[in-house]
């Protein structure tokens, strides 16, 4: 079975072709709980996470932090990891034989970076396209191959 995986930083939707092969059916949606949180709210959650240490002078306090990352970027990376882990689990269960992976360019790179070699080999098409707000009917028009005209139509 071929999966069509449409991912964004907010959610991932997995589709399959219907029996008539001209439509797609949604079989799974996974939403990123941090995907809709505003950047400023993520920063507030990170506030106060530095570590307090006493410096070399009596009475002085220094605050240090580990490497700083953009909290929004960290949330994207974490969701990309979750997507890759989910897809790897499903690959091992033979839920699909191949897939088309569609995502906005920078997020597609993050997901690909989290995928193992075997999982990457199962991807037949990597499509850099943001379909996050695209309705299912329009996604079908974009990801399903266009049928070739018959030889009869070509001869007319």
Image (spheres, helix red, strand yellow):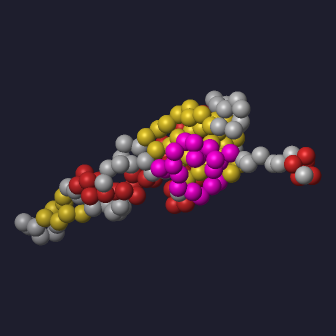
Locate residue 94, reporting x and y percent: 67, 31
Verify whether residue 66 appears in magenta. Answer: no
Please name whichever residue, 109 or 114, is drawn nearer the observer in this view of the structure. Answer: 109
Outermost residue toward the front in this view: 156
Locate residue 88, reporting x and y percent: 59, 39
Looking at the image, residue 56 sits to the left or right of residue 132; the answer is left
Looking at the image, residue 85 sits to the left or right of residue 69; the answer is right
> 63 above or below 124?
below
Q: Work out whether residue 83 can be spotted.
A: no
Quarter of the image holding residue 64? bottom left
Q: How many marks?
A: 0
Verify whether residue 137 appears in magenta. Answer: yes
Q: Work out whether residue 16 can be spotted.
A: yes
Looking at the image, residue 10 sits to the left or right of residue 85; the answer is left
Q: Quadrant of the N terminus?
A: top right
Outermost residue toward the bottom in this view: 57
Please name whichever residue, 28 or 87, is drawn nearer the observer in this view of the structure. Answer: 28
At 57% from the left edge and 57% from the top edge, which residue is drawn?
A: 129
At 46% from the left edge and 44% from the top edge, which residue is drawn?
A: 11
Locate residue 140, reporting x and y percent: 62, 44
Q: Which residues are magenta?
A: 126-144
Looking at the image, residue 111 sits to the left or right of residue 97; the answer is left
Locate residue 38, reporting x and y percent: 30, 54
At 72% from the left edge and 47% from the top edge, which residue is drawn?
A: 145
At 17% from the left edge and 65% from the top edge, which residue is drawn?
A: 62
């Amino acid at each position: 079975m071929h999966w069509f995986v449409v991912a964004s930083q907010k959610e991932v939707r997995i589709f399959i072709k219907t029996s008539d092969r001209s439509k797609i059916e949604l079989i799974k949606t996974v939403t990123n709980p941090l995907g809709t949180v505003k950047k400023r709210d993520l920063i507030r959650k990170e506030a106060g996470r530095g570590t307090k240490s006493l410096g070399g002078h009596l009475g002085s306090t220094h605050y240090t932090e580990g490497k700083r990352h953009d909290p929004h970027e960290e949330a994207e990376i974490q969701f990309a990891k979750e997507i890759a882990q989910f897809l790897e689990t499903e690959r091992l269960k033979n839920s699909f034989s191949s897939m088309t992976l569609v995502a906005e360019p920078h997020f597609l790179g993050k997901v690909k970076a989290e995928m193992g070699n075997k999982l990457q080999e199962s991807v037949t098409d990597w499509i850099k396209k943001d379909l996050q707000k695209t309705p299912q009917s329009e996604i079908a028009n974009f990801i399903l191959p266009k049928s070739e005209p018959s030889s009869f139509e070509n001869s007319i």
